[in-house]
Image (tube, helix red, strand yellow):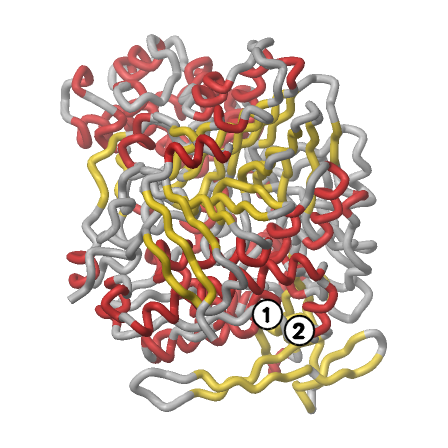
Amino acid sequence: MNKPGPERGGTIRLPGARAPIEILEDAMGVPHIRAKSKHDAFFGQGYVVARDRMFQLDWDYRRELGRMAEVFGPRFVTADRAARLFLYRGDVDAELKSLPPEVLDCARGYVAGINARIDELEADPSQLPPEFGILGITPLRWDVRDLVRLRGGGLGDADDEVRHAQLQACGLLDYDRFMDPLRPAWQFTVPEGLDCAAVGEVDLGILLEGSAPLPFGQKIAAYDRDIDRIDRIAQGSNAWTVAGSRTATGRPILANDPHLGIGGLSPRHIAHLTAPGLDVIGGGDPGLPGIMQGHTDRFAFGRTNFHIDQTDLFILKTREDDPEQYWHNGQWKRFETVEEEIVVKDAPAERVTLRYSQGRPVISQDPARQRAVVQASVALLPGANMRFAIIAINLAHDWASLRQALKIHVSPTNHHYADIHGNTGWQASGFTPKRPKHDGLFPAPGDGSYDWTGILSVEEMPSSYNPKAGWFASANQMNLPSDYPYRERKISFSWSDSYRYDRIAEVLNSQPKHRVEDSVALQHDVQSLPARALVKLLPTTLSPEATPAAALLRQWNCGIAADSAAALLYEQVMPELSSAFRDLVIPKAARDLLKTMNLSEMLRALANPDHYLGDNPVAARDALLDKALAAGWTKAVELAGPDPAQWRWGDLHQVSIAHPLSASPAIAAAFPKIDGGRSGGDSYTVMARGVNLGRKTFNVLHGASYLLVADVGAWDNSRVLLLPGQSADPRSPHYRDWYQDWLAGDMQPLWFSKAAVDKAAVTRTTIAPAKG
């Protein structure tokens, strides 16, 4: 019989701790870890995150190592092969030696803390989270070497490169802008020697075949490439930093709300790590040592996704009489190979051969066509040790040392900074390939002539320190400075629409004395700039079927509020408009390639109708709008009833959280769904609450499950939210205790000072080193 949940309080002895560690927890389950060394502070973080999120840690670890088939059977062999193909195959010992010793010591502490919790579970299996018993598995022990080996892999922009080649081959590449406009201004150039007509989806090989399944007969979210693309576009983050010159207190304010998946396991866990030379608090990614968004005693730090094209496809010519050889730099070379054995539950083990060219994974092969395709990824370069980068950030003490820490920060990120001396800064970072001969928008010949020649340094990336405007923000928009030499330093040509940023700028520019409360309100702002644009386009003359929809939208304030009838209607009209626009504008020959329309490009085209809409573009535009209004009204009636006075967007747009394996009746029973909450917002409001109609639901699927507003220097004034709670174990009181606060936008104190933490503590646990 399982116990009520992980135990808290008292003294426990654990292997791996070097000295006593004290953990104080407040009423919301936030652990404040006090240690005598940085190693032990990270040990404490590893221990508490394993206590709260053990299955989440183990699931991700198994999946990334390619060890799912050994517990779930043959269906997982392909996914395991794909995961192993993207493990780092270089010198792991050399990578560990290249890290700052203090960073490596903290990482070892984190891993030791996870393993210490696993020791407890082995000694008392009744404490195991329910999934383990239901699935009949036990947690894998962690190894710090795996933090080097696990580099991550995936589609990246490979499908974009293939799509560009396919559109070029049929003379329709110009239409790609309606799906993914190039930003900043750029012209497509086909790499010399690339046969676009020969490029096809088959070249993506294992990138498509290896999408990870789930047990019980389904794949993750019923994986669909087009839906996945919509999800990737919708996900993003907001951050803004306001200098003391523009705040009511004279202190900087830094706000950050990362937009990640909502509906399954929470992607953030809050902790406070204190030791000599270390005092940091905020949200971390379970399984990644350190705090990703939060503050130290000296500065606040936040992050949003920056856009970097970090992958490329290279088309290799293989030898006709020996397909294990490929042509590169004027000679035939043999693929590097790695033999792996995949253990399979209830079936014989499978041997797989993984192939590499210059360390780049071979994702597909066609000997009959003398062709192989490799994916180059910055994540597989020596030194790309992203899993240690957050530790380095946490150990920094000022702007200069933060920028130094970013040298191993691989992931494309806008870093926000504000310190107790009043300084503010923005630094874009992430490994960016140097491509002397191409721009990454097409696959390139793999003969060596298009190979990368290095990566941009942190100093070559865009940045700003103490900007004159007194504030800056990032919301995944194209934010390269106007004088940035992007033609020589090609970073990316694909960015998110700027609607969230534009709304943030509108609000911040109107507030000369910004307050913490203003940041909290802005994080929950539901004003829709696309809705404003749509209302301006509404024709004066409409059909009887479209007239009531236009009337309701014209009297609306364009807020996507949970209790708004017009918001519900708007959310039905826009998909109809997008679909009709695509059918009118995109030639039939390109529709299988261009399945989703970019919102800002569509609204721009409707506001400035031209030949893409036909011989009479204004009439065609008005007919599109009329058709969409009428169809949207019909859909709203179907979903919410005939009386628009009863329509409420939140009745459709709900926040429902279920275990990702809830297709299993046993897991569904053990992990009751957390639901009933109504929400406003959509993918384009600052309060991003994304919906993906391709998934046949209006539930919130993306958004800020973790929100932070930091009052720099007066740290106890900072505010935080987390959805749905610190623990993923339903036996814990912290399984869903943040849910109602999150729905209400009632941000909670993030206690930091010793006095405030001591006062708020409800439990105290001491970790003592194991005897002997």
Question: In the image, residue 648 lies at what x, y percent?
Answer: 23, 23
* Sequence-wise first label, 1 or 2: 2
Q: Mark 1 near mark 2, Cβ–Cβ under 8 Å? A: yes
**Residue 132 left/right relative to 178:** left
Question: In the image, residue 137 lies at what x, y percent?
Answer: 30, 74
- Packing grade of label 1 (10 A; few <14, some 14-19, many >=20) is many
Q: Is residue 645 above or below residue 394?
A: above
Q: Is residue 302 above or below residue 48?
A: above
Provide the secondary structure element on which disc 2 rests. Answer: helix
Badge 2 is on which residue? 92
Query: Of all residues shown, which one is farthest toward the front?
Result: 771
Q: Which mark is residue 298?
A: none
Mark 2: amino acid: Val
State the residue at coordinates (61%, 82%): 367
State the residue at coordinates (61%, 52%): 391
Q: Is residue 694 visible?
A: no
Q: Quadrant of residue 328?
A: bottom right
**Residue 175 left/right relative to 653:** right
Q: How far is mark 1 from mark 2, CA to CA?
A: 7 Å
In this view of the protein, which residue sits in the foreground, 337 or 124? 124
Q: How many marks?
A: 2
- Packing grade of label 2 (10 A; few <14, some 14-19, many >=20) is some
Badge 1 is on which residue? 149
**Residue 489 left/right relative to 350:** right
Question: In the image, residue 94 lies at what x, y percent?
Answer: 72, 72
